[in-house]
Image: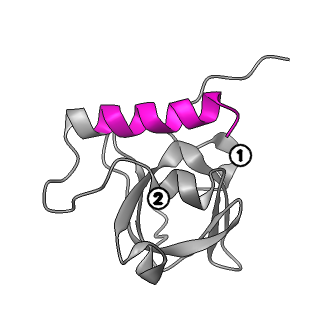
Amino acid sequence: MSMSAFDPWNYRETAGYTEGTDLTGYKIAAVDGDIGKVDEATDKAGVPGLVVDTGPWIFGRKVLLPAGVIERVDHDDEKVYVDRTKDQIKDAPEYDADAGVDDDYRTRLGGYYDDTYRSGM
């Protein structure tokens, strides 16, 4: 059984996401529990993903979840399911809204989530 390649910067065909859909306010569910809400959804070329406000869970830090970690979107419950643990998300390269997403950050974040995918999550 071979693992398909992980693509951090594209939504999976099976995720149930349609380009242009506003996911702001949706809850985020990691494999081991809820971690926060979508603060901003972006479809920017090369950087589609969700900025998540983790609230008190990791001291109000915001994280960027690349589109590729999204397993599925439940529009009825307004919940986005991701295939990573809370700790994997917490340990990801920090997102700085003021700095934005440059090529270096995009490469580091994509590489981080690719490594967690390859290690069997």
Nearest the camera: 30 or 57? 57
Badge 2 local density, few (<14 within 10 Å), some, or many (20+)?
A: some
Q: Is residue 2 left or right of residue 114?
A: right
**Residue ID for mark 2:** 90
Q: Is residue 33 visible?
A: yes
Q: Specify which label sits upstream in the sequence, 1 or 2.
A: 1
Nearest the camera: 75 or 9? 9
CA separation, marks 1 and 2? Answer: 25 Å
Nearest the camera: 90 or 95? 90
Q: Residue 114: within the magenta?
A: yes
Badge 1 local density, few (<14 within 10 Å), some, or many (20+)?
A: few
Main structural element of the magenta stretch: helix, strand or loop? Answer: helix
Q: Give residue 14's mark.
A: 1
Where's the N terminus, which quadrant? top right
The structure's colour scheme is: one colour
Residue 20 against residue 68 in the figure, above or below: below
Q: Give residue 80's mark.
A: none
Q: Is residue 39 left or right of residue 74?
A: left
> Residue at the location (45% across, 36% down)?
112
Q: Is residue 18 visible?
A: no
Q: Is residue 100 left or right of residue 32?
A: left
Q: Is residue 102 left or right of residue 57?
A: left
Q: Percent x, y for residue 120?
A: 70, 34
Q: Percent x, y for residue 79?
A: 64, 73
Q: Secondary structure at mark 2?
A: helix
Magenta stretch, residue numbers: 106-121
Q: Residue 79: within the magenta?
A: no
Residue type, mark 1 in image: Thr
**For discs 1 and 2, the disc positioned in front in the rendered view:** 2
Q: Percent x, y for residue 42?
A: 36, 57
Residue type, mark 2 in image: Lys
> Residue at the location (13% across, 62% down)?
98
